Image (spheres, rainbow, N blue to C red):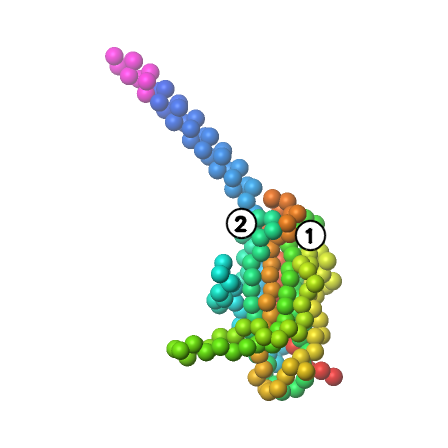
């Protein structure tokens, strides 16, 4: 009786081990085909503007972006939407720049072609809730990209450069909004090498004209 019990016990342990092995193997393959996390930092250049960074939810309601831009679990054709509220700190005529600095010198080709960016620069419209909370949204369009642009197509990481704000400035604390999207193109592969690397920093800056 004891030997028969030991036989069944060994069979149960063998089956359990096999099931565990299958489960672990499946989990490994599942994880290995997910896009891993990649960071794009958010930075401000110059001392004549302040910038607040926001991220949109599925209903396109914007809330403060607490840290860096994270590309994680993306699928082809999916994009995250972001917003910057730019506040000038001078009444001097300004021009604005927007780009990604610090891109890896040896950027993975698939990654460079797959990660795409699109932007719209607008004047800001102020909204005040009954509770006195102030927020800003885009109003008049100043400039925008024609379509999504791949990282590999950006020259020196420049998204736009030297856009004049003079026609839209009226005080020392004017506000502007930059809407931008970052994600994977529709024809990107399901798994992309290099996503574990940081992809530089999204940076907005301004200079005095002249």
Residue at the spot of label 1: 113
Residue 49 occupies quadrant:
bottom right
Mark 2 and mark 1 in contact (Cβ < 8 Å)? no
Range of residues picked out in magenta: 1-9
**Mark 2 neighbour class, 10 Å CA radius: few under 14, some 14 to 19, many 20 or more:** few
Q: Residue at x 42, y 28 (%)?
A: 19
Question: What residue is shown with label 2?
Answer: 73
Question: SS for tag 1?
Answer: helix
N-term mark: 1 or 2: 2
Query: Residue 10 in the image: x percent, y percent?
Result: 35, 20
Most distant residue in the left direction: 1
Dominant SS of magenta comes to: helix
Residue at x 36%, y 24% (from the top left corner): 13
Query: Residue 57's spot in the image, x, y percent?
Result: 49, 60
Is 7 included in the stretch rendered in magenta? yes
Between 6 and 92, which is closer to the camera in this rendering?
Answer: 92
């Amino acid at each position: 009786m004891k030997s028969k019990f030991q036989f069944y016990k060994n069979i149960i342990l063998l089956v359990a081990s096999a099931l565990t092995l299958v489960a672990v193997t499946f989990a490994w393959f599942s994880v290995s085909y997910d896009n891993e996390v990649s960071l794009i930092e958010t930075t401000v250049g110059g001392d004549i503007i302040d910038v607040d960074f926001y991220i949109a939810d599925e209903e396109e309601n914007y809330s403060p972006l607490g840290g860096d831009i994270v590309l994680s679990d993306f699928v082809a054709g999916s994009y995250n939407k972001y917003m910057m509220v730019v506040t000038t700190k001078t009444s001097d005529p300004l021009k604005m720049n927007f780009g990604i600095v610090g891109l890896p010198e040896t950027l993975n080709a698939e990654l460079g072609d797959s990660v795409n960016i699109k932007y719209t620069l607008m004047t800001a419209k102020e909204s005040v809730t009954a509770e006195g909370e102030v927020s800003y949204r885009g109003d008049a369009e100043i400039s925008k990209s024609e379509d999504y642009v791949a990282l590999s197509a950006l020259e020196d990481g420049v998204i736009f450069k030297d856009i004049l704000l003079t026609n839209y400035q009226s005080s020392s604390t004017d506000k502007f909004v930059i809407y931008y999207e970052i994600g994977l193109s529709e024809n990107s592969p399901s798994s992309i090498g290099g996503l574990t690397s940081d992809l530089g920093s999204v940076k907005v800056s301004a200079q005095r004209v002249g």
